[in-house]
Image (cartoon, grey):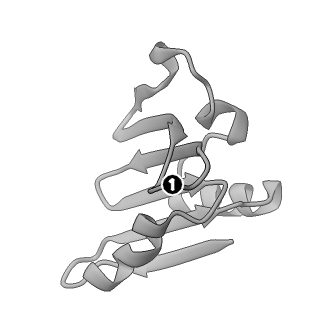
Amino acid sequence: MITIHPIARTQHCWVDLCQPSPQELAQAAEKVGFALPDRAAIGEIEFSSRVRRQGDVLFLNVPRFQDDDGPTAPLGFALSPSMLVTLREQRIGSLEDFPARL
């Protein structure tokens, strides 16, 4: 699922991808203008794979994120000058509640 949250009083947005299909991931990458990591890349446990920069985009992969007492799952971030992209495989309460604060 792709959800786009505008950020108030800016021209920026947060693109949240929760359990994206390969087609949704490709569609989102086309819209944001840069390649997005797939599930395998986000779950990579090698430290050197967790943070990287590609041009103006900073990528951060958290291979084992846990929200409260829920199960662990990978969580990925891509931050460009105009948007934040999150990639996740399950609902994460702290991210679900965040749009109300934008």
Give left or right: position of 20 versus 5.
right
Query: 86 above or below 13?
Result: above
The local crowd at label 1, few if under 14, some if 14 to 19, many if 20 or more residues have their Cα within 10 Å, is few
Quadrant where the C terminus sits is bottom left
Q: Residue drawn at (54%, 15%), measured in percent from left and top?
A: 46
**Among the 4 quarters of the image, the one containing residue 51:** top left
Query: 80 above or below 13?
Result: above
Give left or right: position of 6 versus 19.
left
The answer, for residue 102, to whether it is visible in the render is no
Q: Position of residue 19 (x, y in %)?
A: 71, 60
Query: 91 above or below 66?
Result: below
Residue matched to label 1? 69
Given residues 33 and 6, the one toward you in this image is 6
Quadrant where the N terminus sits is bottom right
**Among the 4 quarters of the image, the one containing residue 5:** bottom left
The answer, for residue 11, to whether it is visible in the render is yes
**Dot 1 amino acid type:** Asp
Residue at the extreme front: 69
Q: Residue drawn at (57%, 21%), measured in percent from left and top?
A: 45
Residue at the extreme left: 9
Q: Residue drawn at (47%, 57%), measured in percent from left and top?
A: 85
Q: Position of residue 89 (x, y in %)?
A: 66, 54
SS category of the residue bearing label 1: loop
Q: Position of residue 64 (x, y in %)?
A: 54, 36
Figure label count: 1
Given residues 74 and 49, the one toward you in this image is 74
Q: Position of residue 86 (x, y in %)?
A: 49, 56
